[in-house]
Amino acid sequence: MAKNIVIACNALRDEINLVVNELQINYPIIWVDAGLHNHPSKLKDELQKLINNIDNVDNILLLFGNCGNSVLGLKSEKASIILPRVDDCISLLLGGNEHKAALDQKGTSYYLTKGYLHSGASMWTEYLNCIDKYGYEKSLMIFKTMLVNYKGLRLIDTGAYELDDIRDTFLKMAKEFGLEPETVPGTIRTVYKAFKKEWDEEFIVVKPGQPV
């Protein structure tokens, strides 16, 4: 039987744990700090370091999106690397790049999930840290400038957590930044397919010794 190991973004923990529990999967999972998304080169270095330290497996399931090109060039000499064919984790939870693009045509929005909000790498965390350093008025001006081209704040309902757990924070963020709050349906179909080894055209399968 093929031996599999998973390297996954910590922001996807709720969705992955739901799938793992339902399918009774016992693959080892290595969680990666979601804060590294803010530094793609550091994320790439960390992923390659983890891959280099993995031995005696056939497949490395990399549950990340491209995420600032952080997965490009990753390579395992001994195992295949399998990853979803998506631009980022948001696209993964919305059902693919095309679904996200269709939503964005209705207006560019910033996306949230419970995992991302609690990961320590979210915009809200950065905003609160900015207030501690520079004060409320200056911080609000900075973030409203950053978000000037955004029309909405979208909460993705992946079905892996209770929306009420973060609804208050979500609505507070929308009000603070002057964004239109909206809850949109998500999907963890790709996560299910990943763990069921249904690696079709929605996945990239990279053979040992070949770079992503």
Image (cartoon, rainbow, N blue to C red):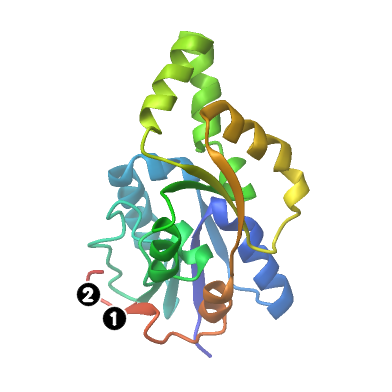
Q: Which residue is mark 2?
A: 210
Instruction: Say which quarter of the image contains residue 20.
Output: bottom right
User: Residue 130 vs residue 42: left or right?
Assistant: right
Residue at the outermost bottom position? 1
Tell me what residue is drawn at x 49 percent, y 10 percent.
Answer: 137
Tag of residue 97: none
Does dot 1 land on a helix, a strand or a loop? loop
Q: Position of residue 5 (x, y in %)?
A: 50, 71
Camera-side residue: 81 or 176? 176
Q: Position of residue 186 (x, y in %)?
A: 59, 64
Q: Amino acid at mark 1?
A: Lys
Q: Which residue is mark 1?
A: 207
Does dot 2 land on a helix, a strand or a loop? loop
Say above or below: 62 vs 166. Answer: below
Q: Amino acid at mark 2?
A: Gln
Q: Position of residue 83 (x, y in %)?
A: 40, 71
